[in-house]
């Protein structure tokens, strides 16, 4: 197990919390430790970090399927606050979870539908590559390549790989130099 530190801003000074991460539960950790023929890790540090960032947002947004009933909405404490003038204590937590869910949706849209399913399966649901291949109907041993492509695209979106973050579709605006300005002839006829 490893410990990662995160800083959380509150009304007062910044609070640093230690999160314990079990490297054995993540397929990405296994791929990061595993070496290819050249002795290099199967995925880069940027790909690993991008996958773990997606996983953190996914879990924080509570996007995992529920396996039990959520009884909290029926509690008297929550019903009594419904019409109150003050904001419930958990509202900030709900706002943060909603923001995390929106980040996950944006990431998946940027990566595209072809690659997002393997990211959800491997990074978020912690399925192994073989299981993800079978679920997608891919040939054996192709999942690793598709996952590497998806993680590269994900890292690029987060700005972790050398390229700029992906923001919608890229298009060429002009072929001129940086200081190029076109000349327009404007006539006074009207």
Image (tube, rainbow, N blue to C red):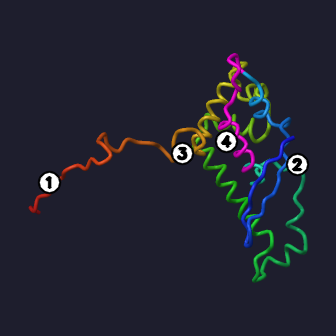
Front residue of 185 and 85: 185
Residue depicted at x 90% and y 70% = 75
Count of labels in the image: 4
Label 4 vs label 1, nearer the camera: 4
Above or below for 75 versus 20: below
Q: Quadrant of residue 61?
A: bottom right
Magenta stretch bounds: 36-57
- Quick one: SS at disc 1? loop
* Separation of residues labelled 2 and 4 (CA atoms): 27 Å
63 lies above or below 176:
below
The residue under label 2 is 67
Closer to the eye: label 2 or 1: 1
Q: CA distance from mark 3 to mark 2?
A: 36 Å
Q: Which mark is residue 50?
A: 4
Q: In the rendered structure, are the residues bearing label 3 and label 1 in contact, judged by CB atoms less than 8 Å apart?
A: no
Q: Which residue is mark 1?
A: 185
Gap in angstroms between the C-alphas marked 4 and 3: 12 Å
Image position, residue 180 (x, y; %): 27, 47
- Which is more N-terminal, label 1 or label 4? 4
């Amino acid at each position: 197990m490893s410990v990662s530190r995160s800083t959380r801003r509150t009304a007062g000074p910044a609070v640093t919390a230690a999160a314990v991460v079990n490297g054995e539960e993540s397929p990405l950790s296994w791929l990061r430790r595993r070496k290819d023929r050249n002795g290099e890790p199967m995925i880069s540090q940027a790909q690993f970090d991008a996958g773990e960032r997606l996983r953190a947002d996914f879990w924080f947004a509570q996007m995992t399927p529920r396996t039990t009933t959520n009884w909290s909405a029926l509690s008297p404490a929550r019903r009594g606050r419904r019409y109150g003038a003050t904001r419930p204590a958990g509202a900030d937590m709900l706002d943060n979870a909603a923001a995390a869910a929106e980040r996950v949706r944006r990431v998946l849209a940027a990566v595209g539908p072809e690659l997002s399913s393997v990211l959800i399966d491997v990074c978020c649901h912690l399925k192994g590559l073989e299981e993800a291949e079978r679920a997608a109907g891919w040939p054996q041993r192709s999942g690793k390549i598709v996952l590497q492509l998806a993680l590269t695209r994900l890292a690029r979106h987060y700005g972790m790989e050398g390229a700029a973050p992906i923001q919608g579709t890229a298009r060429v605006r002009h072929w001129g130099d940086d200081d190029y300005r076109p000349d327009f002839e404007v006539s006074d006829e009207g």
